[in-house]
């Protein structure tokens, strides 16, 4: 029965989880940007401790203060003062990127129960940090004493950590979904888990600059910003997951394009050249020379990288063209990182969709939410991992 899951520990969910990539709170925004690009990770954890320092550190001081991603940097660069001086902004402390919302990251012990983790997530935690047995050998530890640890060091006083997300818990519950009958087969409408209030949405022709605060909020809420037409019908989204695959210069596009144009700009495969030129023109009109310089630097870096790659591996390029088509939209671009990218098409379901169907849909697309629409594409709400967890938590209460 489902009650058996109550005694499972969070360590059961940590099997096979990689150790966290981390940054000390003393790092800069530029350090965070470089570490994200080097690691290929979507998120990096920020820690109170700095193991590059020679000072002795107590284990109690090794605490994760929060997490940062490319979207945090992009939104930071979109601030008016940073648009005019992006290179100065990159020298700011990484703490400027951390969310002011408390409790987004929580520490627990490996023996904490799954139910405790679910309760923390329903209280607002996005990531549960769990200590795991270090897999670093004695030789590796000796090397770390000789060489200065990198910004993405994963060991803290001989202990490694991983974190659990709402996605991890939902996937774990899905593996035992038969224990929750009949809840999984019920519609999301009958379970009352469709959130229809405070939906983050913007009209297609609204300026994208007006969406910056909504993007930040959607990152905190682990949702997205819906793009709708004047009939309130859903036509797409501006997703933090898609933005996280872009380079930092996408801040220029956000500051100059409409919401609809931005959807096309960040779509998988790189922005259309006409939109790139439009952004540059508007940057010049606004006298944002440094941001324009940043765009040019990244474009030049992209060209140099692609030229080097094509000359050294022409056969690989040929096979890639066969797979994706010449100039195909899913080829890696210098404006897009090696992290997973996805299109700005919204993932949708209907009020009568079953809970298990929506769970599978969200997990398959690696998103933490699914938009709810009617037959005519009118947006009626959103279902999130958090609301799904509420349904399972209510079931747990009936078994207690």
Image: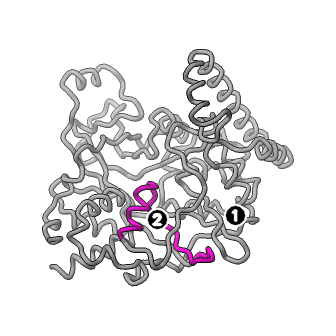
Q: Quadrant of the N terminus?
A: bottom left
> What label sits on residue 35 in the rendered view?
none
Q: Quadrant of the C terminus?
A: bottom left
In this figure, what is the number of numbered marks?
A: 2
What residue appears at the point 62 percent right and 16 percent down from the top-left corner? 311
Q: Nearer the viewer, residue 183 or 221?
A: 183
Q: Position of residue 377 (x, y in %)?
A: 61, 74
Q: Using a 10 Å C-alpha cutoff, classify the residue at mark 2 as few (fewer than 14 neighbours), some (14 to 19) or many (20 or more).
A: many
The range drawn in magenta is: 356-379
Please name the residue that numbered disc 1 is placed on. Answer: 210
Q: Quadrant of residue 17?
A: top left
Instruction: Check disc 1 and report its element: helix, strand or loop.
Output: helix
> What label sits on residue 369 in the rendered view?
2
Residue lying furthest right in this view?
Answer: 285
Of the two numbered discs 1 and 2 in the rendering, the one whose residue sits closer to the viewer = 2
In the rendered structure, the answer to whether residue 75 lies left or right of residue 17 reads right
Instruction: Indicate whether residue 29 is drawn in magenta.
Output: no
Q: Position of residue 362 (x, y in %)?
A: 43, 61
Instruction: Check disc 2 and report its element: helix, strand or loop.
Output: strand
């Amino acid at each position: 029965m489902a009650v058996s899951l109550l005694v499972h520990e969070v360590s059961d969910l940590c099997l096979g989880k990689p150790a966290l990539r981390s940054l000390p709170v003393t790092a800069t925004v530029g350090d965070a940007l470089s570490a994200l690009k080097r690691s290929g990770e979507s998120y990096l954890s920020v820690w109170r401790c700095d193991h590059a320092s020679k000072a002795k550190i107590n284990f109690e001081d090794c605490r994760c203060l929060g997490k940062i991603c490319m979207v945090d940097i992009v939104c930071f660069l979109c601030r008016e003062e940073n648009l005019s001086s992006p290179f100065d902004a990159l020298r700011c402390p990484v703490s400027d990127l951390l969310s002011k919302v408390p409790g987004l990251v929580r520490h627990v012990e490996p023996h904490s129960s799954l139910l405790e983790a679910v309760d923390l997530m329903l209280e607002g935690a996005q990531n549960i940090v769990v200590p795991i047995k270090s897999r670093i050998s004695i030789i590796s530890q000796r090397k770390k004493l000789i060489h200065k640890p990198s910004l993405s060091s994963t060991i803290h006083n001989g202990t490694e950590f991983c974190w659990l997300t709402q996605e991890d818990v939902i996937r774990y519950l899905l593996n035992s979904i038969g224990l929750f009958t009949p809840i999984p087969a019920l519609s999301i409408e009958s379970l009352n888990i469709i959130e229809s209030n405070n939906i983050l949405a913007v009209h297609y022709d609204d300026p994208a600059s007006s969406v910056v605060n909504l993007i930040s909020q959607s990152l905190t809420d682990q949702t997205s910003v819906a793009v709708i037409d004047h009939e309130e019908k859903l036509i797409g989204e501006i997703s933090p997951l898609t933005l996280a695959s872009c380079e930092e210069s996408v801040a220029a596009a956000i500051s100059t394009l409409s919401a609809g144009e931005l959807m096309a700009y960040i779509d998988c495969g790189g922005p259309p050249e006409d939109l790139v030129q439009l952004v540059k023109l508007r940057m010049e009109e606004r006298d944002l020379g440094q941001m324009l310089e940043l765009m040019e630097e990244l474009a030049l870096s992209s060209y140099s990288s692609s030229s080097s790659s094509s000359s050294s591996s022409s056969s690989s390029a040929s096979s890639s063209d066969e797979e994706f088509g010449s100039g195909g939209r899913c080829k890696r671009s210098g404006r897009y990182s090696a992290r997973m990218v996805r299109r700005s098409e919204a993932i949708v379901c209907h009020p009568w969709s079953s809970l298990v169907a929506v769970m599978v849909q969200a997990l398959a697309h690696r998103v933490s939410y699914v938009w709810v629409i009617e037959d005519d594409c009118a947006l009626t709400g959103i279902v999130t991992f958090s609301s799904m967890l509420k349904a399972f938590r209510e079931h747990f209460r009936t078994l207690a």
